[in-house]
Amino acid sequence: MLRVRCLRGGSRGAEAAHLIGAMLGRTMTGWVQGAFQSYSSSAAAAQPQRALEENTVTEPELQECPVCAYNEWDPLEEVIVGRAENARVPPFTVEVKANTYEKHWPFYQKYGGQSFPEDHLKKAVAEIEEMCNILRMEGVTVQRPEPMDWSFEYNTPDFTSTGMYAAMPRDILMVVGNEIIEAPMAWRSRFFEYRAYRPLIKEYFRKGAKWTTPPKPTMSDELYDQEYPIRTVEDRHKLAAQGKFVTTEHEPCFDAADFIRAGRDLFVQRSQVTNYMGIEWMRRHLAPDYKVHIISFKDPNPMHIDATFNIIGPGLVLSNPDRPCRQVEMFEKAGWTVVKPPTPLIPDDHPLWMSSKWLSMNVLMLDPKRVMCDANEHTIHKMFENLGIKTIKVNIRHANSLGGGFHCWTTDVRRRGSLESYFH
Protein backbone atom coordinates (compact mmCIF):
# COMPACT_ATOMS: atom_id res chain seq x y z
CA MET A 1 0.00 0.00 0.00
CA LEU A 2 1.27 3.44 -0.92
CA ARG A 3 2.41 5.55 2.03
CA VAL A 4 3.65 9.13 1.96
CA ARG A 5 7.26 9.52 3.01
CA CYS A 6 8.91 12.82 3.84
CA LEU A 7 12.37 14.23 4.39
CA ARG A 8 13.31 14.88 8.00
CA GLY A 9 12.83 18.52 8.86
CA GLY A 10 10.72 19.69 5.92
CA SER A 11 9.74 19.26 2.28
CA ARG A 12 12.07 17.64 -0.21
CA GLY A 13 12.28 20.65 -2.54
CA ALA A 14 13.07 23.18 0.17
CA GLU A 15 15.72 21.02 1.84
CA ALA A 16 17.38 20.09 -1.44
CA ALA A 17 17.54 23.74 -2.50
CA HIS A 18 19.10 24.69 0.82
CA LEU A 19 21.75 21.97 0.63
CA ILE A 20 22.66 22.67 -3.00
CA GLY A 21 22.91 26.39 -2.28
CA ALA A 22 25.16 25.73 0.70
CA MET A 23 27.36 23.43 -1.36
CA LEU A 24 27.79 25.95 -4.17
CA GLY A 25 28.44 28.78 -1.72
CA ARG A 26 31.18 26.86 0.07
CA THR A 27 32.66 25.70 -3.23
CA MET A 28 32.95 29.25 -4.60
CA THR A 29 34.43 30.51 -1.35
CA GLY A 30 37.08 27.80 -1.44
CA TRP A 31 37.94 28.63 -5.07
CA VAL A 32 38.40 32.36 -4.41
CA GLN A 33 40.58 31.75 -1.36
CA GLY A 34 42.75 29.30 -3.32
CA ALA A 35 43.24 31.74 -6.17
CA PHE A 36 44.58 34.46 -3.87
CA GLN A 37 46.75 32.12 -1.81
CA SER A 38 48.72 30.69 -4.76
CA TYR A 39 49.75 31.89 -8.23
CA SER A 40 50.24 28.27 -9.26
CA SER A 41 47.62 27.20 -11.78
CA SER A 42 47.76 23.65 -10.48
CA ALA A 43 47.03 24.82 -6.93
CA ALA A 44 44.21 27.04 -8.12
CA ALA A 45 42.68 24.12 -10.00
CA ALA A 46 43.04 21.71 -7.09
CA GLN A 47 41.32 23.92 -4.51
CA PRO A 48 37.78 23.77 -5.93
CA GLN A 49 38.16 20.01 -6.38
CA ARG A 50 39.03 19.62 -2.68
CA ALA A 51 36.03 21.81 -1.77
CA LEU A 52 33.71 19.60 -3.80
CA GLU A 53 35.07 16.45 -2.17
CA GLU A 54 34.62 17.92 1.32
CA ASN A 55 31.02 18.96 0.65
CA THR A 56 29.53 15.88 -0.94
CA VAL A 57 25.74 16.02 -0.46
CA THR A 58 24.07 12.84 0.75
CA GLU A 59 20.34 12.10 0.71
CA PRO A 60 18.77 12.92 4.12
CA GLU A 61 17.27 9.96 5.94
CA LEU A 62 13.70 9.21 4.89
CA GLN A 63 11.00 8.77 7.52
CA GLU A 64 7.29 8.16 7.51
CA CYS A 65 5.34 11.43 7.37
CA PRO A 66 3.33 12.05 10.57
CA VAL A 67 0.55 13.66 8.52
CA CYS A 68 -1.36 11.71 5.86
CA ALA A 69 -5.09 11.51 5.10
CA TYR A 70 -6.91 11.29 1.80
CA ASN A 71 -10.51 10.65 2.85
CA GLU A 72 -12.93 10.46 5.77
CA TRP A 73 -12.92 6.69 6.43
CA ASP A 74 -9.48 5.05 6.15
CA PRO A 75 -8.24 3.56 9.47
CA LEU A 76 -7.65 6.46 11.87
CA GLU A 77 -4.24 6.54 13.56
CA GLU A 78 -3.92 10.10 14.93
CA VAL A 79 -6.42 12.87 15.56
CA ILE A 80 -6.60 16.38 17.02
CA VAL A 81 -9.49 16.85 19.46
CA GLY A 82 -10.59 20.37 20.39
CA ARG A 83 -10.87 22.02 23.81
CA ALA A 84 -13.93 23.50 25.49
CA GLU A 85 -11.86 25.14 28.23
CA ASN A 86 -12.28 28.93 28.47
CA ALA A 87 -14.79 29.00 25.57
CA ARG A 88 -16.48 32.38 25.08
CA VAL A 89 -19.74 33.36 23.44
CA PRO A 90 -18.82 35.30 20.27
CA PRO A 91 -19.88 38.95 20.07
CA PHE A 92 -23.19 39.34 18.23
CA THR A 93 -21.82 40.66 14.94
CA VAL A 94 -23.46 40.47 11.51
CA GLU A 95 -21.68 37.24 10.52
CA VAL A 96 -22.70 35.55 13.80
CA LYS A 97 -26.30 36.72 13.42
CA ALA A 98 -26.44 35.23 9.90
CA ASN A 99 -25.25 31.85 11.18
CA THR A 100 -27.57 31.51 14.18
CA TYR A 101 -31.31 31.16 14.60
CA GLU A 102 -33.52 33.96 15.82
CA LYS A 103 -34.55 32.13 19.00
CA HIS A 104 -30.91 32.27 20.17
CA TRP A 105 -30.29 35.94 19.39
CA PRO A 106 -31.20 37.12 22.94
CA PHE A 107 -28.57 34.69 24.28
CA TYR A 108 -25.88 36.29 22.10
CA GLN A 109 -27.04 39.80 22.88
CA LYS A 110 -26.81 39.05 26.61
CA TYR A 111 -23.66 36.92 26.77
CA GLY A 112 -21.61 37.96 23.73
CA GLY A 113 -17.96 38.32 24.79
CA GLN A 114 -18.58 36.41 28.04
CA SER A 115 -18.08 32.79 29.02
CA PHE A 116 -20.62 30.15 28.08
CA PRO A 117 -22.72 29.11 31.12
CA GLU A 118 -20.18 27.70 33.60
CA ASP A 119 -21.99 24.50 34.57
CA HIS A 120 -22.71 23.64 30.95
CA LEU A 121 -19.08 24.27 30.00
CA LYS A 122 -17.77 22.01 32.78
CA LYS A 123 -19.95 19.18 31.53
CA ALA A 124 -18.76 19.73 27.97
CA VAL A 125 -15.11 19.59 29.08
CA ALA A 126 -15.74 16.30 30.92
CA GLU A 127 -17.53 14.80 27.91
CA ILE A 128 -14.66 15.63 25.55
CA GLU A 129 -12.11 14.18 27.98
CA GLU A 130 -14.10 10.94 28.00
CA MET A 131 -14.26 11.03 24.20
CA CYS A 132 -10.45 11.31 24.09
CA ASN A 133 -10.12 8.34 26.46
CA ILE A 134 -12.37 6.21 24.27
CA LEU A 135 -10.42 7.17 21.14
CA ARG A 136 -7.21 6.07 22.87
CA MET A 137 -8.85 2.78 23.87
CA GLU A 138 -9.71 2.29 20.18
CA GLY A 139 -6.01 2.63 19.32
CA VAL A 140 -6.00 6.25 18.14
CA THR A 141 -3.28 8.75 19.14
CA VAL A 142 -4.95 11.92 20.47
CA GLN A 143 -3.44 15.41 20.27
CA ARG A 144 -4.93 18.58 21.81
CA PRO A 145 -4.55 22.30 21.09
CA GLU A 146 -3.04 24.59 23.72
CA PRO A 147 -5.35 26.04 26.41
CA MET A 148 -5.80 29.75 25.69
CA ASP A 149 -7.39 32.77 27.30
CA TRP A 150 -10.07 33.85 24.82
CA SER A 151 -11.40 36.71 26.97
CA PHE A 152 -8.88 39.34 25.89
CA GLU A 153 -10.04 42.04 23.49
CA TYR A 154 -7.90 42.54 20.40
CA ASN A 155 -7.78 45.26 17.80
CA THR A 156 -6.78 45.17 14.15
CA PRO A 157 -6.88 48.12 11.74
CA ASP A 158 -10.32 46.87 10.66
CA PHE A 159 -12.18 45.59 13.73
CA THR A 160 -12.23 44.90 17.47
CA SER A 161 -13.31 41.59 19.00
CA THR A 162 -12.83 39.09 21.77
CA GLY A 163 -11.94 35.45 21.07
CA MET A 164 -14.13 32.36 21.04
CA TYR A 165 -12.51 28.92 21.49
CA ALA A 166 -10.37 26.14 20.02
CA ALA A 167 -13.15 23.57 20.26
CA MET A 168 -13.67 22.69 16.60
CA PRO A 169 -10.38 21.88 14.83
CA ARG A 170 -12.36 20.67 11.78
CA ASP A 171 -13.27 24.31 11.09
CA ILE A 172 -9.70 25.58 10.92
CA LEU A 173 -7.50 22.61 9.88
CA MET A 174 -7.75 20.28 6.91
CA VAL A 175 -5.32 17.52 5.97
CA VAL A 176 -4.99 16.68 2.28
CA GLY A 177 -2.34 14.04 1.70
CA ASN A 178 0.72 15.07 3.73
CA GLU A 179 -0.30 18.74 3.87
CA ILE A 180 -1.97 20.64 6.71
CA ILE A 181 -4.04 23.58 5.42
CA GLU A 182 -4.92 26.32 7.90
CA ALA A 183 -8.27 27.81 6.89
CA PRO A 184 -8.79 31.61 6.57
CA MET A 185 -12.05 31.61 8.52
CA ALA A 186 -14.73 34.30 8.34
CA TRP A 187 -15.74 35.04 11.96
CA ARG A 188 -13.89 37.92 13.60
CA SER A 189 -14.02 36.17 16.98
CA ARG A 190 -11.95 33.34 15.45
CA PHE A 191 -9.24 35.53 13.89
CA PHE A 192 -6.51 34.34 16.30
CA GLU A 193 -7.80 30.81 16.84
CA TYR A 194 -4.83 29.39 14.90
CA ARG A 195 -2.53 30.28 17.82
CA ALA A 196 -3.87 27.35 19.87
CA TYR A 197 -2.80 24.90 17.16
CA ARG A 198 0.56 26.37 16.16
CA PRO A 199 2.73 24.28 18.55
CA LEU A 200 1.20 21.09 17.10
CA ILE A 201 1.50 22.23 13.50
CA LYS A 202 5.12 23.31 13.94
CA GLU A 203 5.96 19.88 15.35
CA TYR A 204 4.31 18.15 12.40
CA PHE A 205 6.22 20.45 10.05
CA ARG A 206 9.53 19.65 11.74
CA LYS A 207 8.81 15.96 11.20
CA GLY A 208 8.17 16.39 7.50
CA ALA A 209 4.59 17.54 6.93
CA LYS A 210 3.76 20.31 4.49
CA TRP A 211 2.12 23.36 6.08
CA THR A 212 0.07 25.88 4.11
CA THR A 213 -1.69 29.02 5.26
CA PRO A 214 -3.89 30.72 2.63
CA PRO A 215 -4.10 34.55 2.52
CA LYS A 216 -5.57 35.63 5.86
CA PRO A 217 -8.61 37.88 5.38
CA THR A 218 -8.55 41.36 6.86
CA MET A 219 -12.20 40.85 7.90
CA SER A 220 -12.91 44.47 7.13
CA ASP A 221 -16.53 45.60 6.81
CA GLU A 222 -16.36 44.97 3.05
CA LEU A 223 -16.21 41.20 3.64
CA TYR A 224 -19.75 41.24 5.07
CA ASP A 225 -23.13 42.38 3.76
CA GLN A 226 -23.95 44.70 6.62
CA GLU A 227 -27.61 44.86 5.56
CA TYR A 228 -28.10 41.10 5.17
CA PRO A 229 -31.87 40.59 5.74
CA ILE A 230 -32.45 37.54 7.95
CA ARG A 231 -35.50 38.31 10.03
CA THR A 232 -37.24 35.00 9.38
CA VAL A 233 -36.51 31.45 8.21
CA GLU A 234 -38.38 32.36 5.01
CA ASP A 235 -35.87 35.16 4.43
CA ARG A 236 -33.03 32.68 4.78
CA HIS A 237 -34.56 30.20 2.34
CA LYS A 238 -35.15 32.92 -0.24
CA LEU A 239 -31.64 34.35 0.07
CA ALA A 240 -29.97 30.92 -0.02
CA ALA A 241 -31.95 29.99 -3.15
CA GLN A 242 -30.74 33.23 -4.76
CA GLY A 243 -27.15 32.42 -3.81
CA LYS A 244 -26.88 35.38 -1.43
CA PHE A 245 -24.83 35.09 1.73
CA VAL A 246 -23.56 37.33 4.50
CA THR A 247 -19.98 37.01 3.25
CA THR A 248 -19.14 38.88 0.05
CA GLU A 249 -16.41 38.20 -2.51
CA HIS A 250 -14.21 41.00 -1.15
CA GLU A 251 -11.39 38.57 -0.29
CA PRO A 252 -10.96 34.79 0.03
CA CYS A 253 -12.38 33.12 3.12
CA PHE A 254 -13.41 29.58 3.98
CA ASP A 255 -13.91 27.24 6.90
CA ALA A 256 -12.25 23.87 6.37
CA ALA A 257 -15.47 22.19 7.54
CA ASP A 258 -17.20 23.24 4.32
CA PHE A 259 -14.99 20.73 2.46
CA ILE A 260 -15.24 16.95 2.61
CA ARG A 261 -12.71 14.53 1.10
CA ALA A 262 -13.03 11.43 -1.05
CA GLY A 263 -9.54 10.69 -2.38
CA ARG A 264 -8.80 12.72 -5.51
CA ASP A 265 -12.16 14.50 -5.22
CA LEU A 266 -13.14 17.10 -2.64
CA PHE A 267 -16.68 18.46 -2.33
CA VAL A 268 -17.46 21.94 -1.02
CA GLN A 269 -20.43 24.23 -0.54
CA ARG A 270 -20.66 28.00 -0.86
CA SER A 271 -21.88 28.97 2.62
CA GLN A 272 -22.15 31.85 5.06
CA VAL A 273 -18.45 31.40 5.93
CA THR A 274 -16.98 30.07 2.65
CA ASN A 275 -17.04 32.26 -0.45
CA TYR A 276 -16.28 31.53 -4.10
CA MET A 277 -12.89 33.24 -3.84
CA GLY A 278 -11.92 30.87 -1.06
CA ILE A 279 -13.12 27.88 -3.05
CA GLU A 280 -11.18 29.05 -6.11
CA TRP A 281 -8.03 29.48 -4.03
CA MET A 282 -8.35 25.87 -2.88
CA ARG A 283 -9.10 24.63 -6.40
CA ARG A 284 -5.94 26.23 -7.82
CA HIS A 285 -3.83 25.19 -4.84
CA LEU A 286 -4.80 21.51 -5.00
CA ALA A 287 -4.77 21.14 -8.80
CA PRO A 288 -3.86 19.03 -10.72
CA ASP A 289 -3.75 16.16 -8.19
CA TYR A 290 -7.19 16.87 -6.74
CA LYS A 291 -10.50 18.12 -8.12
CA VAL A 292 -12.75 20.44 -6.10
CA HIS A 293 -16.49 20.11 -6.86
CA ILE A 294 -19.04 22.70 -5.72
CA ILE A 295 -22.32 21.20 -4.55
CA SER A 296 -25.34 22.88 -2.97
CA PHE A 297 -28.30 22.03 -0.77
CA LYS A 298 -31.79 23.24 0.03
CA ASP A 299 -30.48 24.77 3.24
CA PRO A 300 -31.65 28.13 4.62
CA ASN A 301 -28.48 28.55 6.65
CA PRO A 302 -25.51 26.77 5.02
CA MET A 303 -22.49 26.58 7.30
CA HIS A 304 -20.26 23.50 7.31
CA ILE A 305 -21.06 20.53 5.11
CA ASP A 306 -20.63 17.64 7.55
CA ALA A 307 -24.09 17.75 9.18
CA THR A 308 -25.65 17.91 5.71
CA PHE A 309 -23.52 15.65 3.52
CA ASN A 310 -21.11 13.33 5.33
CA ILE A 311 -19.08 10.81 3.30
CA ILE A 312 -18.52 7.72 5.47
CA GLY A 313 -17.01 5.21 3.05
CA PRO A 314 -15.96 4.62 -0.55
CA GLY A 315 -19.10 5.50 -2.50
CA LEU A 316 -21.18 5.80 0.69
CA VAL A 317 -22.61 9.10 1.93
CA LEU A 318 -25.10 10.28 4.55
CA SER A 319 -27.38 12.92 3.01
CA ASN A 320 -29.58 15.05 5.27
CA PRO A 321 -33.24 14.56 4.20
CA ASP A 322 -34.14 18.05 5.45
CA ARG A 323 -31.42 19.60 3.28
CA PRO A 324 -31.35 17.51 0.10
CA CYS A 325 -28.39 17.83 -2.22
CA ARG A 326 -29.29 19.48 -5.52
CA GLN A 327 -26.66 17.39 -7.32
CA VAL A 328 -27.58 14.01 -5.77
CA GLU A 329 -28.09 12.44 -9.21
CA MET A 330 -24.43 13.07 -9.95
CA PHE A 331 -23.49 10.76 -7.08
CA GLU A 332 -26.10 8.14 -7.93
CA LYS A 333 -24.87 8.01 -11.54
CA ALA A 334 -21.34 7.47 -10.20
CA GLY A 335 -22.63 4.37 -8.38
CA TRP A 336 -22.63 5.86 -4.88
CA THR A 337 -25.06 4.75 -2.18
CA VAL A 338 -26.89 7.76 -0.72
CA VAL A 339 -28.28 7.05 2.76
CA LYS A 340 -30.82 9.30 4.48
CA PRO A 341 -30.20 9.22 8.24
CA PRO A 342 -33.18 9.08 10.63
CA THR A 343 -34.64 12.13 12.33
CA PRO A 344 -32.49 13.17 15.33
CA LEU A 345 -33.75 12.31 18.82
CA ILE A 346 -32.19 15.23 20.73
CA PRO A 347 -34.88 16.96 22.85
CA ASP A 348 -36.26 20.34 21.79
CA ASP A 349 -35.32 21.90 25.13
CA HIS A 350 -31.61 21.03 24.84
CA PRO A 351 -29.68 24.22 23.98
CA LEU A 352 -27.97 24.17 20.57
CA TRP A 353 -26.68 27.73 20.34
CA MET A 354 -24.70 27.24 17.13
CA SER A 355 -26.08 24.24 15.31
CA SER A 356 -29.09 22.10 14.49
CA LYS A 357 -30.20 18.70 15.77
CA TRP A 358 -28.61 17.11 12.72
CA LEU A 359 -25.34 16.83 14.60
CA SER A 360 -26.62 13.25 14.97
CA MET A 361 -25.12 12.54 11.51
CA ASN A 362 -21.90 14.46 12.28
CA VAL A 363 -20.06 11.23 13.02
CA LEU A 364 -16.37 10.28 12.98
CA MET A 365 -15.31 7.16 11.08
CA LEU A 366 -12.54 5.22 12.84
CA ASP A 367 -12.30 2.91 9.84
CA PRO A 368 -14.81 1.63 7.23
CA LYS A 369 -16.40 -0.68 9.83
CA ARG A 370 -16.31 1.46 13.01
CA VAL A 371 -17.99 4.81 13.68
CA MET A 372 -18.01 7.11 16.71
CA CYS A 373 -21.53 8.42 17.20
CA ASP A 374 -23.94 9.84 19.79
CA ALA A 375 -24.84 7.35 22.52
CA ASN A 376 -28.37 8.79 22.73
CA GLU A 377 -29.26 8.46 19.03
CA HIS A 378 -30.65 4.89 19.03
CA THR A 379 -32.19 5.11 15.57
CA ILE A 380 -28.91 6.03 13.92
CA HIS A 381 -27.26 3.09 15.74
CA LYS A 382 -29.73 0.84 13.94
CA MET A 383 -28.96 2.53 10.62
CA PHE A 384 -25.24 1.81 11.04
CA GLU A 385 -25.97 -1.78 12.10
CA ASN A 386 -27.86 -2.26 8.84
CA LEU A 387 -24.82 -0.92 6.97
CA GLY A 388 -22.54 -3.42 8.74
CA ILE A 389 -20.76 -0.71 10.74
CA LYS A 390 -20.00 -1.09 14.47
CA THR A 391 -20.96 1.92 16.60
CA ILE A 392 -18.63 3.36 19.26
CA LYS A 393 -21.16 5.19 21.41
CA VAL A 394 -20.15 8.37 23.27
CA ASN A 395 -22.28 11.03 24.96
CA ILE A 396 -21.27 14.62 24.09
CA ARG A 397 -24.66 16.36 24.38
CA HIS A 398 -23.30 19.36 26.31
CA ALA A 399 -20.36 19.63 23.90
CA ASN A 400 -22.90 19.65 21.04
CA SER A 401 -24.23 22.93 22.41
CA LEU A 402 -20.95 24.64 21.50
CA GLY A 403 -21.53 23.99 17.82
CA GLY A 404 -20.37 20.53 16.77
CA GLY A 405 -20.54 16.76 16.77
CA PHE A 406 -17.73 14.21 16.60
CA HIS A 407 -16.57 15.25 13.12
CA CYS A 408 -16.51 18.93 14.12
CA TRP A 409 -14.63 18.30 17.36
CA THR A 410 -11.80 16.55 15.51
CA THR A 411 -9.31 16.84 12.67
CA ASP A 412 -7.89 13.56 11.45
CA VAL A 413 -4.13 13.92 11.15
CA ARG A 414 -3.21 10.46 9.91
CA ARG A 415 -5.26 7.71 8.31
CA ARG A 416 -3.70 4.52 6.99
CA GLY A 417 -4.47 4.46 3.29
CA SER A 418 -3.51 5.52 -0.22
CA LEU A 419 -4.65 8.15 -2.72
CA GLU A 420 -7.41 6.74 -4.91
CA SER A 421 -10.31 7.90 -7.09
CA TYR A 422 -13.81 7.08 -5.88
CA PHE A 423 -15.85 9.46 -8.06
CA HIS A 424 -16.09 8.74 -11.80
Image (spheres, rainbow, N blue to C red):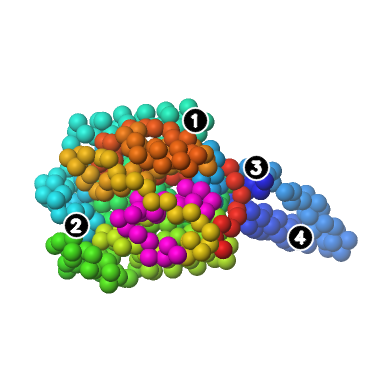
The kind of residue on which mark 4 rests is Trp
Q: Which residue is mark 2?
A: 97
Q: Which residue is mark 1?
A: 138
Q: CA distance from mark 3 to mark 4?
A: 36 Å
Query: Callout 3: few (<14), some (14-19), or many (20+) C-alpha neighbours within 10 Å?
Result: few
Q: Quadrant of the C terminus?
A: bottom right
Of callouts 4 and 1, the N-terminal one: 4
Asked if the stretch drawn in magenta spans residue 322, the answer is yes
Q: Which residue is mark 3?
A: 63
Give coordinates of residue 202: x percent, y percent: 48, 45
Q: Which residue is mark 4?
A: 31
Residue lying at 45% horizontally and 60% vertically, measured from the top left:
267
Which element carries disc 1, helix, strand or loop? loop
Asked if the stretch drawn in magenta spans residue 30, the answer is no
Residue lying at 54% horizontally and 51% vertically, measured from the top left:
314
Q: Nearer the viewer, residue 6 or 22?
A: 6
Residue lying at 38% horizontally and 68% vertically, measured from the top left:
276
Query: Callout 1: few (<14), some (14-19), or many (20+) C-alpha neighbours within 10 Å?
Result: some
Q: Is residue 324 left or right of residue 330?
A: left
Of callouts 2 and 4, the N-terminal one: 4
The kind of residue on which mark 3 rests is Gln
Residue 195 is at least partly visible in this image:
no
Q: CA distance from mark 2 to mark 4?
A: 67 Å
